[in-house]
Amino acid sequence: MKIVLYLHLHQPWRLARYRYVDVGSGQTYVDRERNLAIFRRIAEQSYRPAFLRLRRMLEEDPGFRLSLSVTGPWIEQAREAAPDLLPALAAMVHTGHVSIVGETYYHSLAFLLPAPELQEEVAMHRAVVRQEFGTQPRVLRMTELAYSDDLARFAAEQHFSGMLAEGWDGTLQGRPPTRVYTSAAAPSVALLLRHYPLSDDVGFRFSSREWKEYPLTAEKYVGWISRLDGDVVNLFLDFETFGEHHAPSTGILDFLQALPTHVRSYPHLGWATVEEAIELPKFGELSAPRTTTWADQNRDLGAWLGNDLQRSAFETAKSVGEIVRRSHDPDLLDIWRQLLTSDHFYYMYLGGHGADLGVHQYFSAYGSPYDAYATYMNALTDLRQRALRAPAAGEKGSTA
């Protein structure tokens, strides 16, 4: 059985406080210094120490494999706040044992917008990956592991060979997530499904003293994996799991570094990148008429579009986008795309309870969802006015 360890690197450009009276003032929407300060802190807590551990794992175990996705905003912030991280990441990729996964440049909700937004953002991401790491992704993920039959068709049209998706029971219909499937809608696209119980054991439960399996050791964890049936176990996690979501004092970095040692104890276990895993034998086809994600207990789009605030913000963003595209102003288009980053809608979450609510509150950059909504809508109002003043905005038949 192959183990696919996939880690996601993303930091949003969080908005500054933007009041209605600030509309038209020329004030920037993004609190640049705050974002860079947050990035520097996380780099110190998570990125640098985890990069160091992973590089050692790659050097000490020729069989170890790793897959990463890296968003455009993460790369932009790394360039300014922690420029040493990009060459360190490139060095890991150049070992040949690390795959980069394709996605939208802005970690956005572009997959819910009319063409050509999704195609353009994926192309932007491909370009920055080539520039920074000299590689071309063959496997695609959508923001927060969004997946559907339509997205599989898109992946095939864009010449991707595989996609990542949540191994959700509603999609699997009793089949195991430990197999490689193909999309029923696009048979050329292989599907790697996240093993969410084992992924969440590390991502969410690792440092919980109330968890019955606490403390979780690498030996115990690999023992669980060894007893699974199938061809592949996909462990998909946020990179910040290691050092940020779980502090170094919890032992999370030691846990990570110890995994290859214990995997070697089981002759039938090994590692694979996402690109290697999609070449494994296929177990059958999967259909997903509705979009699934890895967010919240319902595994749907409710984390971003589940309430009236979120839907209002998204519909307004769509309408402003039409005006921005008619403006033919590349700077305004970049700003609009920053505002499509999924995190902005995540901060407006109102519903839910228990674990879902706690996770949203942990990540939120605001005192309340209403503050997030007001700030976002004021920024959109200002952007709309700027786009309408652009010379090309009123030209008949203009397109971006």
Image (cartoon, grey):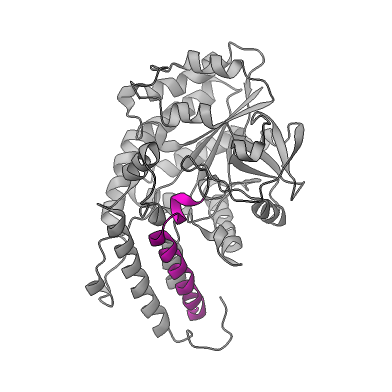
Identify which residue is drawn at 45% across, 53% down.
304
Please determine whether, in this image, residue 281 is positioned above or below residue 105.
above
Residue 371, quarter of the rendered image: bottom left
Front residue of this view, candidates 182 and 247? 182
The stretch in magenta equals 301-329
Identify which residue is drawn at 25% across, 72% down.
20
Residue 316 part of the magenta-drawn span: yes
Identify which residue is drawn at 63% across, 50% down.
148
Q: Where residue 185 sits: x, y (%)?
A: 74, 50
Please determine whether, in this image, residue 369 is positioned above or below residue 254.
below
* Residue 167 visible in rendering: no
Q: Where residue 287 sits: x, y (%)?
A: 70, 45
Q: Where residue 222 sits: x, y (%)?
A: 54, 17
Residue 169, quarter of the rendered image: top right
Q: Is 237 placed left or right of 118 in the picture?
A: left
Name of the residue lying farthest toward the top: 265
Q: Where residue 155 sits: x, y (%)?
A: 67, 52
Identify which residue is drawn at 43% across, 70% down.
316
Q: Is 390 placed left or right of 162 in the picture?
A: left
Q: Quadrant of the C terminus?
A: bottom right
